[in-house]
Amino acid sequence: MDAYELSLSQGIGAIARGELTSEQWTRALLARIGALDPRVEAFAWLDPNAALALAAAADAAAALRGAPIAAKDIIDTRDVPTRMGSPAYGDNVPARSATVVERLERAGAFVLGKTVTTELAFYTPGKTRNPWNSAHTPGGSSMGSAASVACGMVAGALGTQTNGYRMAAPASLQQAVSWIDRNVVPGTTVLAPVREGKWIEGLSGRPALFSSAVRYSFRPDEWRRSLAADTLLRSGGALVNEYFFVRLTDEVANAAVPRGMAIGVNHGGEYLDLLQIASGGTRLLDASGNLETLATLPNLDGASRSATGDGLAASVTSTWSGERQGAPVTFREIVSLQGDASTLVVRASATTTGPIGFELELHPAQLPLTHISVTGNAAELTFAVAGSSEPQLRVLLSGAFATLAALPDGGLQVRSSGGPIRLLITDLSGAGSPTNGVQFLEPAELVAAYDVGAVLLVRDPAFEGRRIRLEALGFRLARTFGPYAVLVSR
């Protein structure tokens, strides 16, 4: 066994038995780093000569016997740069080491190098790649520490853990991943929530498809994978460009033609669901002049859905139908996006033997509304601060018999007393210049494109709906492990 292959306890034991020195161990690790780190990029700072000097001076009789340790670059190290993955700390050289480093040094270890972190250990990723698949991230903020240990560049490394990524049942997760490795075709992808997805990639090297809150900070491929995971786990299809991520949703998980819509807007790199069109608020109105409810959208059957797109523009057309008062009733909705446009277009119409009236409601979703101004058939909406600014939308309504009004509890009511309407929703707080085009994400096509062989779900309140939706895509429940359920393709 080469020295770089030794675990921390094995290396310490070998030094205790006189079979290895700290300097020999360090040289083996530095050689491994030299061979792999140009590809993995796990280290933010490394001085091989300084590391060898510390190894030569190490106390072989101390508890840790000169073990070389890597430290995440948010952990202070005396006279060594601690840049925290941020240009704001580019010149930061602490005068004192963090307590954890001091204790390790008193026990006989030393810091060989500093490993890459996400900026300030939060969302913006660092440069490190997964050592088993360089197209993927190795996970969250301790990416450099995780990758360096995983591929034998160090035997131990310091990382940190924010509460948001703590596993509720890590032993159950490891059992689930082991079962997947034994029973699912090697190399196929696992669809999972973001926390578990990062751990799956680290535990098995198998690709994971997961949705992460901040998308623009990621490499383009990871941005697309994140959208794909979000579509599969939370919708029946989605329309996306640089500005909007519009998910088609329904209270019935496996509805063939989803009746609702969640309108996500790119705000500072993160898609936030700002508005939703709930199916229960869409009503078809009697054409008698009394405008009484003739039908609600949940009472109609999904008749058809079709999507078109050419990379420059994309749209999805949904149709629902039924029979009321002895006559056929149809409601049609067309949602469209241009690749370079910050405006979402929604067209809707209702007919029986002729045009009839209808109304639909736009309600705030993820963030509360702080201000709404309606002038005629135009409205401007301001939402609570997200990040450093307030998301803002403009809504314009056109149609010969169309009216727009504020709802008492927030949001907007769109009404037509007869005839089609055209609704324009514009993002005023704007993403950057478009680079990723526009497309409709069809769940069945995403399963095939990403070769999804298994799904790992948390058995939380959303589990049942997600299970039903995934079963409609050809998956079946195979095993449960504590709070986790594993579904596999039939």
Image (cartoon, rainbow, N blue to C red):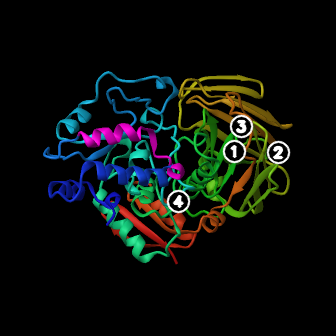
Badge 2, how many Cα within 10 Å: few under 14, some, many 20+?
Answer: many
Residue 414 numbered tag: 3
Q: Main secondary structure of the magenta part?
A: helix
Question: What kind of residue is marked 2?
Answer: Pro
Residue 292 numbered tag: 1
Give the residue drawn at x 14%, y 46%: 63
Label 2, label 1: how far apart the Cα atoms are:
18 Å
Residue 156 numbered tag: none
- Residue corresponding to mark 2: 420
Marks 4 & 3, CB-CB < 8 Å contact: no
Give the residue drawn at x 39%, y 24%: 93
Marks 2 & 1, CB-CB < 8 Å contact: no
Task: Assess whether residue 47 is covered by the magenta stretch.
Answer: yes
Residue 133 numbered tag: 4
In this rendering, would 141 be left or right of 446?
A: left
For residue 179, above or below residue 375: below
Q: Earlier in the sequence, mark 1 or mark 3?
A: 1
Give the residue drawn at x 39%, y 52%: 153
Question: What kind of residue is marked 1?
Answer: Glu
Q: Earlier in the sequence, mark 4 or mark 2?
A: 4
Where is residue 474? Give x, y as percent: 56, 73
Q: Earlier in the sequence, mark 2 or mark 1?
A: 1
Question: What kind of residue is marked 3?
Answer: Val
**Chain part drawn in magenta:** 38-57
Label 2, label 3: how far apart the Cα atoms are:
11 Å
Using the rendered image of the protein, determine whether residue 150 is visible from the camera's viewpoint. Answer: yes
Nearest to the eye among marks 4 and 2: give it: 4
Label 1, label 4: how far apart the Cα atoms are:
59 Å
Label 4, label 3: how far apart the Cα atoms are:
49 Å
Q: Earlier in the sequence, mark 2 or mark 3?
A: 3
